[in-house]
Image: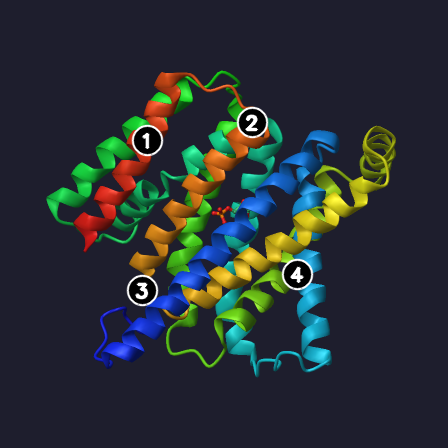
Amino acid sequence: RPLDINVELPDEQAAQKIKIGMYFATWWALNVVFNIYNKKVLNAFPYPWLTSTLSLACGSLMMLISWATRIADAPKTDFEFWKTLFPVAVAHTIGHVAATVSMSKVAVSFTHIIKSGEPAFSVLVSKFLLGDTFPLPVYLSLLPIIGGCALSAVTELNFNMTGFMGAMISNLAFVFRNIFSKKGMSGKSVSGMNYYACLSMLSLLILTPFAIAVEGPQMWAAGWQNALAQIGPNFVWWVAAQSIFYHLYNQVSYMSLDQISPLTFSIGNTMKRISVIVSSIIIFHTPVQPVNALGAAVAILGTFLYSQAKQ
Ligand code: 3PG
């Protein structure tokens, strides 16, 4: 993957910067829309295992149609590709369903505050499981991340243990997803867009039996009727929106990962969370205490210090 240090002419550099800026702006905007519809759906229909499955199914279908109609070229893959993708898909599935379970139990902003602690998980996993070592400033930057998340968690007005643990499990799973996908994407012949399409399809296969076992058609049918009665026919559009926007934001994020270093990517991801936290607090009128907001700000500041220290 190209690093963002380049030796291009000034004009090319400017064009590349504009392109990455547009990727980032699109990624964040799509993510904000996803988070809003996802929460609206979960408030009326609290079945996160099904909604997670539907987002993957919708993305898989969109990509199959794009390949069939040649809007996008289908990737050339072999058994080795799918074998390498499997651990990535397991981690993606766990991270996705855990985040959705979390958002079904707590405010969207709270899930994303805890998810801003992902760099801390990344360092701890790399150190204790992979034996990597980091310079002291990297470890020090974990203090505000962990401290800020902890302060936000203890002062959260609507704290719920499942919601908290879901976000923590999602952090852990996504660290593994990133470690495995680094291996799978390096030297790859599959574009970021198609890589994410294949990831969605494999994750869908993995998640479907678990979603049926945990929730199942009976619960879904009753819940669906209830949601339709409560919201009206618009509910179907909410489900469609959360599924389509889930795929689109992830696709754009993988397309930008193609162009930038993992570090720039993680800074972009943290900035994305700020826009989600702020917009969801406004839209859902989430009650926030000053000390709770302070915790979030400290955690996010910590992730910026972390990215500086890693550089
Ligand atoms: C999901 O449902 O997969 C999560 O909302 C993903 O969270 P992230 O892409 O913001 O890490």
Q: Which comes sooner in the sequence, label 4 or label 3?
A: 4
The kind of secondary structure element at disc 1 is helix
Q: Residue at x 58, y 42 (%)?
A: 35
Disc 4 target residue: 59
Is residue 115 toward the left or the right of residue 44 in the image?
A: left
Q: Residue at x 64, y 41 (%)?
A: 38
Q: Which comes sooner in the sequence, label 4 or label 2?
A: 4
In the displayed structure, would residue 199 be above or below residue 135?
below
Name the kind of residue labelled 2 in the image. Val
Discs 2, 3 touching: Cβ within 8 Å: no
Q: Is the residue marked 4 within 8 Å of ligand 1, measured from its CB?
A: no
Q: For residue 77, what is the image quadrant? A: bottom right
In the displayed structure, would residue 237 be above or below residue 221?
below
Disc 3 target residue: 261
**Mark 4 and mark 2: Cα distance apart in space:** 25 Å
Q: Is residue 53 visible?
A: no
The kind of secondary structure element at disc 3 is loop
Disc 2 target residue: 106
Mark closer to the observer (1, 3): 1
The kind of secondary structure element at disc 2 is loop
Q: Characterize the local packing of mark 1: few (<14), some (14-19) or many (20 or more) Cα atoms within 10 angstroms.
A: some
Disc 1 target residue: 297
Name the spot of residue 296 as percent of width and height, x first.
Answer: 36, 29
Q: Which mark is residue 89?
A: none
Q: For residue 15, what is the image quadrant? A: bottom left
